[in-house]
Image (cartoon, rainbow, N blue to C red):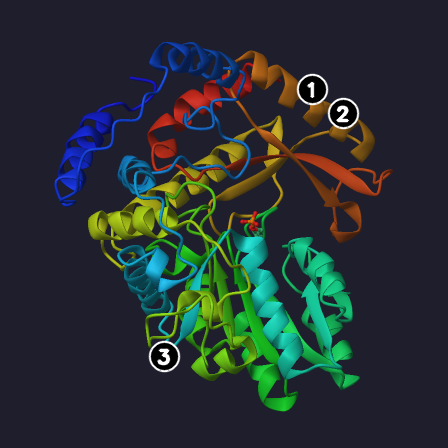
């Protein structure tokens, strides 16, 4: 089996069940199924032109296939196509959204929350920073230079002043540089990246919370990629401690479409203080005409949103709840195991070396050499050669100014490295095969 297909039978059965819930006269619309088949075969043909993101030999970019239950439940919802903007357009899927958002808030240890699903991490971060700007209108947003580039761009969109904080050699926020900025007294919000997109490094949230007592600022945690790692059982103690403190930050972004087994179009923003709803509320009587409840559309900047995303995530949470000790947490633990084992192999290799010990499940590694220019070229060659061996890696540029005490010459600003996001639990079993193909690519 390369592509999972058994869930299609379940979907067929569930559509019949769904249909039986509507006591309505039959509608006979004619579709040209022959033409549809021709078009569908053309689509299938076109879609063959993809890297195999779903396969364990795809050990490159941050891509993880949706769980079959997420895919099937999402598709089932498509026969209704609910819009989670207003309750009337999403009678079943809006309550499902509230449930899954509560599950996620609980996972982070929030006692109360305000939140909703979004189209993705970018929109979720936009809402987090928008509220940050409403609370501290004239103040700075700061984030590390390894934070997602979206923060700088969003700050521009929101016309909020933005500054970058330096990072250390582990690509975590540099606390000395941070404190310099805090001393100026104009910092409103610090973005704390809980797992950078590049290397999976986790910013020092414990230290940020200490600094917060002295300098008053909001903390917005960008856990788009790393949000689920608090469930993982084999983190370093220092990393686990940082995740355990997430209940103290003002807002959190997590992307169920990154680690949470969902199709794209599923991010989430959570606020610790539900009263931030005041910034969203508005009067729009023509949209909200029946329900007295707070509609999700009233606490979201996006209007129409796919109810199907909530349905997919709800179904996934029934099977794989985001709780410690459950199957989902075991699967994440396995991904991290894969990263740790990969790291061990790199340490033992005389061709490649790891840049740092993985803090989550991303491994960044480089080719040995005398100077960074040729080392970068070597990484590019390995990347290309690996693809010929059906092993798919990604590239990452590490700022060479962060290197300390290295025995190679630094003659470029960046070192091109190889990067593997080992997000799939299967990666652990496939590690020997991945390594074999990697060695063939030197
Ligand atoms: C992916 C990511 C984003 C952007 O989220 P999208 O879902 O791609 O819009 C923001 N921050 C971090 C840390 C991410 O990993």
Disc 3: which residue: 112
**369 and 375: which one is in front?**
375
Location of the C terminus by quadrant is top right
Q: Secondary structure at mark 3?
A: loop
Say whether residue 49 is visible. Answer: yes
Q: Quadrant of the N terminus?
A: top left
Residue 333 visible within the image: no
- Which mark is in front, 1 or 3? 3
Q: Which residue is mark 1?
A: 381
Per the model, the C-alpha gap separating discs 3 and 2 is: 51 Å
Q: Position of residue 152 (x, y in %)?
A: 73, 60
- Is label 3 or label 2 in front? 3
- Count of numbered circles on the image: 3
Residue 199: give x, y in percent of width and height. Answer: 59, 47
Ranked by sequence position, the earlier of labels 1 and 3 is: 3
Local crowd size for mark 3, using a 10 Å CA cut-off: few (<14), some (14–19), many (≥20): some
Residue drawn 36% across the image and 34% down it: 428
State the residue at coordinates (15%, 31%): 13
**Which of the pair 231/404 is nearer the observer?**
231
Picture disc at residue 377: 2
């Amino acid at each position: 089996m390369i592509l999972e297909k058994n869930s299609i039978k379940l979907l067929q059965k569930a559509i019949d069940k769904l249909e039986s819930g509507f006591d309505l006269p039959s509608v006979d619309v004619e579709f040209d199924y022959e033409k549809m088949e021709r078009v569908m075969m053309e689509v299938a043909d076109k879609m063959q032109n993809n890297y195999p993101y779903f396969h364990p030999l795809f050990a490159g970019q941050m891509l993880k296939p949706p769980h079959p239950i997420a895919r099937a439940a999402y598709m089932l919802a498509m026969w209704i196509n609910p819009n989670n903007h207003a309750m009337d357009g999403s009678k079943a899927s809006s309550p499902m959204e509230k449930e899954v958002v509560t599950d996620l808030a609980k996972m982070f240890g929030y006692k109360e929350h305000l939140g909703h699903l979004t189209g993705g991490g970018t929109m979720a971060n936009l809402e987090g920073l928008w509220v940050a700007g409403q609370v501290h209108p004239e103040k700075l947003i700061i984030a590390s230079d390894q934070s997602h580039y979206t923060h700088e761009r969003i700050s521009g969109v929101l016309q909020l002043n933005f500054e970058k904080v330096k990072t250390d050699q582990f690509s975590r926020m540099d606390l000395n540089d941070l404190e310099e900025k805090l001393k100026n007294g104009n910092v409103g919000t610090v973005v704390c990246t809980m797992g950078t997109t590049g290397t999976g490094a986790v910013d020092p949230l414990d230290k940020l919370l200490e600094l917060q007592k002295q300098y008053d600022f909001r903390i917005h945690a960008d856990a788009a990629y790393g949000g689920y790692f608090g469930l993982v059982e084999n983190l370093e103690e220092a990393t686990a401690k940082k995740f355990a403190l997430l209940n103290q930050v003002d807002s959190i972004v997590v992307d169920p479409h990154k680690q949470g087994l969902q199709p794209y179009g599923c991010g989430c923003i959570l606020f610790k203080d539900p009263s931030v709803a005041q910034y969203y509320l508005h009067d729009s009587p023509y949209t909200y005409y029946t329900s007295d409840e707070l509609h999700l559309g009233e606490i979201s900047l996006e209007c129409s949103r796919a109810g199907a995303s909530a349905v997919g995530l709800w179904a996934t949470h029934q099977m794989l709840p985001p709780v410690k000790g459950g199957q989902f947490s075991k699967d994440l633990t396995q991904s991290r195991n894969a990263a740790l084992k990969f790291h061990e192999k790199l340490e033992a290799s005389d061709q490649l070396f790891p840049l740092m010990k993985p803090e989550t499940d991303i491994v960044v590694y480089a080719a040995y050499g005398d100077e960074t220019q040729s080392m970068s070229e070597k990484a590019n060659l390995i990347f290309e050669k690996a693809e010929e061996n059906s092993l798919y890696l990604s590239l990452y540029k590490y700022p060479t100014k962060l290197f300390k005490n290295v025995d190679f010459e630094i003659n470029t600003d960046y070192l091109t490295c190889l990067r593997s996001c080992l997000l799939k639990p299967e990666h652990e079993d496939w590690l020997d095969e991945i390594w074999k193909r990697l060695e063939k690519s030197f």
